[in-house]
Amino acid sequence: VNYTGFSFPVNCLDRHVHVAPDKVALIWEKDEPGEQVQVTYRELLELTCRLGNTLKRQGVKQGDRVTIYMPPCPLAVASMLACARIGAVHAVVFAGFSAESLADRIRDAQSETVITVNQGLRGGKIIELKKTVDQAVKQCPGVKRVLVSMRTTSKVPMTALDVPLEEVRGCPAILLLLLGKVLALGEMMKEDAYCEPAVMDSEDMLFLLYTSGSTGKPKGLVHSQAGYLLFAALTHKYVFDYQDRDIFGCVADIGWITGHTYVVYGPLCNGGTTVLFESTPVYPNPVERLRINQFYGAPTAIRLLLRYGDEWVKKYDRSSLKMLGSVGEPINKEAWEWYFRVVGETRCPVVDTWWQTETGGICISPRPSNPGAEILPGMAMRPFFGISPSLLDDKGNVLLENDVSGALCISQAWPGMARTIYNDHKRFLKTYLTSYPGFFFTGDGVYRTSEGYYQLTGRLDDTISISGHRLGTAEVENVVNHHVAVAESAVIGYPHEIKGEGKMLSFLPQNISQGYGTAVGSGTGSSAVSTPYSIRLPKTRSGKIMRRVLRKIVEDKANELGDLTTLDDHEAVQQIIEGHKHLV
Ligand code: PRX
């Protein structure tokens, strides 16, 4: 079979179906503890085809945007692949976003089609996803249809726009769930089990993904067909040393880029078996039960686990693990060492992977598949094949030496690079390509060690300047996090009226079980410790600390907090505002 010229799903499905149709493609680790569902390549292809045909019948055409608002489940993966199969552009919106945020994204993408589920489940709690979609769609006159799948057995009110995907005639939905598979019945079942894949240009849009928006209004980054897939597959294979029979466990929601690249596209293009975590994983139980070989997650989770103590991890069998990965924020040395020593029993290399929604896949990472390659704790280490990082100073000079810090830029295009911001190429150029002409500017600070390794130091907009020293928030947080009472911290800087020097504030959760903490303000010379007050850190829904919000509060500009659509916990912010008022 000649697969050249075909689009994604062929690379991710058909060619594996020819070789090993019964190989498990997805293991859906459901929210119900201990429940899992396996979907083979053959089943996933069939589901994708039926859904692709359904989309076509509903009027979705090549190039149309389709918004997917679903929790991680096989049908969500099939929805992404079905869009790709018919040449439509998927725009997955994390199913924790509010109706307003969803509506903003639907309108920005000009989607006429939304795919969702009746309800979601998270930690046993029912989440009314369809209701949220109904509210969002009211603000989006352009939406012509909402495809609704049944995640739970509860009926939800349907509207004229709704297309029930698994309407079961004479067969109660509960039976479907008991069968333990996502069965394609109803609308989808009427469709043919084969859908001819669209032939696409390599530079056509594959998907839009809105960035987490920890700064400013969300941007719909556009990823391309061929380059993105190539980069997803290569990085998945080489960074994690993925082998044919491995079970890959990336604990990211499909609503984020990590979910796109390392839950869906990378592993499936490599014909692998990938785990879809519906809930916050009851780690490390699934590692033992599913025999996960590569575990990939964010340092926040690792730091919290660390505080629970070694025993909690050690009681589970981790012998299947071969590789551990970290992503999304700098991992401090203590957490790295614990991950390496306790979780991975010093047997598994830890890969601290640096990348962004914009880069499509991992750009800087240790390369353990390169035998003997040295890995230092808490460091992303080396550029991936084809990535050429450059460090630039404030004046735009390229820093060629080692043992130097600067703005992390990339000096030549790479396959996985986002091509534009949807409908706003000017903003794309302004944000990424004009600050340092001739370079892609990542917005991150980096230190290149004397050996030439790369260590990320945090967003440049989070930089603190104290006594003339430029410090990345991550660097200070590393020190703070070292204290036994601290699970995580956020360090911010703001101008000091008298000295003109930076002042910093750190928030230190002490009582992990309640997630409360205290705030400590310290000046540059001697420390002035404020009266502690209880807070939770303000985070985006993807778990990133919103330092920008903290900064505004300590600058007494709580009325100028900016765009808070991605903020997870509004009450936490109110508490910090109140607490700050009472600071002495
Ligand atoms: O600041 C960097 C941080 O996360 C940002 C990208 O966020 P997002 O687009 O949401 O993608 C997250 C998952 C790839 C980066 O600009 N970041 C990501 N990985 C690391 C990191 N910071 C330090 N070390 C990392 N390994």
Image (cartoon, rainbow, N blue to C red):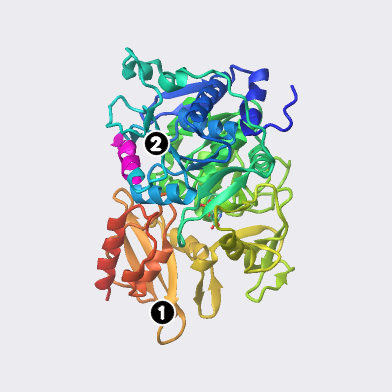
Left or right position of 224 against 341:
right
Mark 1 residue's CB less than 8 Å from ligand 1: no
Residue at x 58%, y 49% (from the top left corner)? 222
Residue at x-position 31% and y-position 61%: 573
**Ligand 1 quadrant in view:** bottom right
Q: Can the viewer see residue 166?
A: yes
Q: Is 405 left or right of 471, judged from the image as shown?
A: right
**Amino acid at dot 2:** Ser
Q: Residue 363's x, y, as percent?
A: 65, 51
Residue lying at the far bottom in this picture: please name it: 498
Give whichever of 440, 538 is nearer the camera: 440
Residue 389 point in image, percent of width and height: 69, 59
Q: Secondary structure at mark 1?
A: loop
**Residue 472 vertical position relative to residue 64 in the rendered view, above or below:** below
Residue position marked by numbered label 2 in the rendering? 279
What type is the residue that disc 1 sits on? Ser
- Return the residue at label 1: 526
Residue at image point 40% right, 69% down: 551
**Residue 506 visible in the snapshot:** no
Q: Is residue 404 above or below residue 74?
A: below
